[in-house]
Image: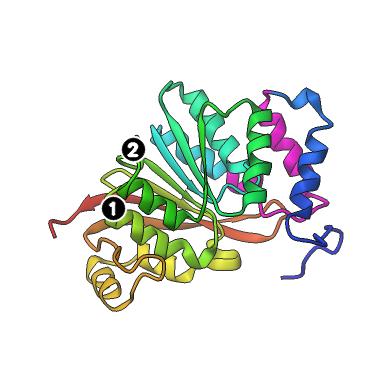
Amino acid sequence: MIMNPSLKQSETPEQNELELLKWLKTKPELQNKPKLILNAIDEFAKTHRLINIGPSKGSLLAEEISKVEPEVLVELGTHTGYSSILMANELKKIGSPTSKIYTFEFNETFYKISSEIIKLAGLEDKIVQILGKASDRIQKIYEEEDTSIEKIDFLFIDHWKYYYLPDLRIIETIGLISLGTTIFADNVIKPGAPDYVEYVNSPPIFKNEYNTKNVNINAPHYPGKWGLLYDSKTVESVTGNGEKDGVEITKCVGILDA
């Protein structure tokens, strides 16, 4: 894939995201207008490289949320808050006063940037931000903390690609994925998450063998649950910069007695 040479590359990590926040702050007309903020980020991404789901894949995400009408939505990877804002805006349309997004972000700078952008959108009542490595914090939520997360209705995965499957296995083991849970994973074509895609498309016998033979790099004592039956499909789309990509949409359609 030939990259667009007109896109500005960050001289230092997080530089483009910091510039985005600075630029959004010059636009008071965006206050409490989530859709306009998303449009503005898309406009910024035309000239600056951002790791962003973009409008094409974003419309797929919004469509799935409208189908599921989730009460508990978990996001792995907040980044600038674009997807959090998109999803929270859909929850507002659905109209449930109790629905929440729990979003995990490892990078402290991104955590602070997304906090300000989410506040600009006026959606902090719908979005619970959690700083730290997703695998560590999910385990602590399960083992130590008092939380309202008992079952995930909708899981959005968009962090480090080689952590997609390890972190899914943690969430499976904890028991947060149940009948009816929808999992939406971004960037499964570019840069790609082939082990994750193979896993969610495989029969229980494969998953059982995989979980037995492969220690979970993020949590050895959380191997995954092979008895969760998934119906999964890859949907091709494009990034915000027009590059070919795709998402994996997975639904838990059954649970074997294991």
**For mark 1, does the 10 Å Cα neighbourhood hold few (<14), some (14 to 19), or many (20 or more) residues?**
some
Between 5 and 238, which is closer to the camera in this rendering?
5
Question: From what the image shows, is residue 109 above or below residue 64?
Answer: below
Outermost residue on the front side: it is 144
Is 215 positioned to the left or the right of 208 in the image? Answer: right
Between 174 and 194, which is closer to the camera in this rendering?
174
Q: Residue shown at 40%/71% (left/top)?
A: 217
Q: Position of residue 22 (x, y in %)?
A: 81, 40
Q: Position of residue 52 (x, y in %)?
A: 66, 50
Which picture quadrant has residue 220? bottom left
Magenta segment's dominant SS is helix
Question: From what the image shows, is residue 123 above or below residue 109?
Answer: above
User: Quick check: is 118 in the magenta stretch?
Assistant: no
The label on residue 146 is 2
Q: Residue shown at 47%/64% (left/top)?
A: 163
User: Magenta span covers which residues?
Assistant: 32-58
Q: Residue shown at 69%/51% (left/top)?
A: 240
The label on residue 129 is none
